[in-house]
Amino acid sequence: MNDGCIKAVLVACLFIVIRIFPLSAQERIPVFISGEEGHKTYRIPAIIDLPGGDLLAFCEGRVNGASDFGDVNIVMKRSSDKGKTWSALQTLVDYDTLQAGNPAPVVDRTDPAIPGGRIFLFYNTGNNHEHEVRKGNGVREVWYISSVDGGQSWSPPVNITPQVHRPLQPGVNVAYNFKEDWRHYANTPGHAMQFASGKYKGRIYVAANHSFGNPAKDGSDYRAHAFYSDDHGKTFQLTDIVNIPGSNEALAAEISDNGLMMNIRNQKGDVKQRIIAKSKDGGVYWDTVYFDNRLPDPVCQGSIISYPVKKGKYVVAVSNAADTVQRNNLTLRISMNEGKTWYRSVLVESGASKDRNTDPTAYSDLVVLSPRSIGVLYEYNGYSRIVFKVVKW
């Protein structure tokens, strides 16, 4: 065999190794550590990048313990070196002794009045436990604050509940399949998004979910939906629901031809897979809804993000706890054909599966750092901390 043939074989082998065994480029970096900086527990991560390159990480700071309801604040940290180091904690929303949660940040990069970009941070407040709100004994509201200086300062809160929650104000129209009013309500969890191109360029889009009517033991009273703004946050509209019983926590990503893909938790747990919903009209109505048997899931949140490549196509990345028994085996998957197949699979984090009382990895969120580099912000080691890792694929 001549030198040219040997070189060709070695290159081919190296390509195969890289595809099968992609490497993470950075060690696990602690961001929010439970018990430090004024909060017993940190949960529900979300992350975005700013036009200048900084990263902003958000989560719920739970003052007294791990419970979803109680004295819960929304907190933030900043990184100016692609996640290697993080600032001290900043509290953005403190709803006294009640709950403020489900932070869903996004940067509006298309408003001509704010050329430097405006950050929107959508969030929910609640005055009772989720199971009580599902019974009709409480309310969950929807708010946002915004920043025009890269998150250094923030506006007063704006309540948009009447525009995005049922019962709706007169004159707000959208198609529904149910007569019951919504009860529980939650954004995402994770980042919101903005359409970067096409017919809906500039649309701010927040995936969400709600319950309706009396609670069902199997979680079938949940449905995913979204709300959006086409006028830089002046007004908001509701999308149609994702008509699969139990469709719950959701995130969304832009795909080609004015399309959108939503990645959704199945609260019922009868099928331990992610639910996918696709839209051809910017995420208002759903053309295709299905379970993806290549995305196993233990009934947990997952994240999705996309970015454009040549010929109007998008790379789509998904992260979730890819285990059907417990919240474990956090995996990042890459699709070059918008979810038809998954081109690469990277195990981001795994734990000791014998301990069923500890979830090694749970909720996560994604941020694009470069065409071959994605940052993953995720819950780690039984919710003892939220950490950041850069994955090159």
Image: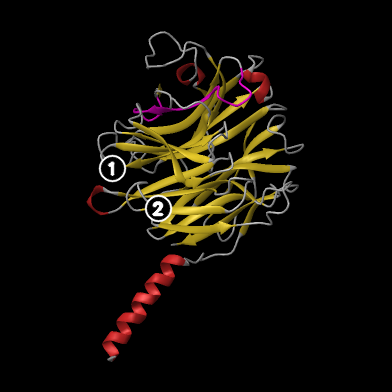
Magenta range is 215-234
Protein image colouring: secondary structure
Let me know if residue 232 appears in the view: yes
Residue 202: mark:
none
Question: Which quadrant would residue 177 be assigned to in this image?
Answer: top left
Give the camera-side residue of 240 and 88. Answer: 240
Compared across the picture, whether 317 is left or right of 209 comes to: left
Density class for disc 1 (Cα within 10 Å; few <14, some 14-19, many ≥20) is some
Q: Residue at x 66, y 35 (%)?
A: 73
Q: Residue at x 57, y 31 (%)?
A: 268
Q: Say above or below: 31 vs 281.
A: below
Residue 128 locus on image (x, y percent): 68, 22
Q: State which quarter of the image contains the N terminus.
A: bottom left
Residue 271 locus on image (x, y percent): 53, 37
Compared across the picture, whether 111 is left or right of 209 comes to: left
Disc 2 secondary structure class: loop
Q: Which residue is mark 2?
A: 342
Q: Which residue is mark 1?
A: 256
Residue 195 locus on image (x, y percent): 34, 38
Compared across the picture, whether 286 is left or right of 120 comes to: left
Q: Amino acid at mark 1?
A: Ser
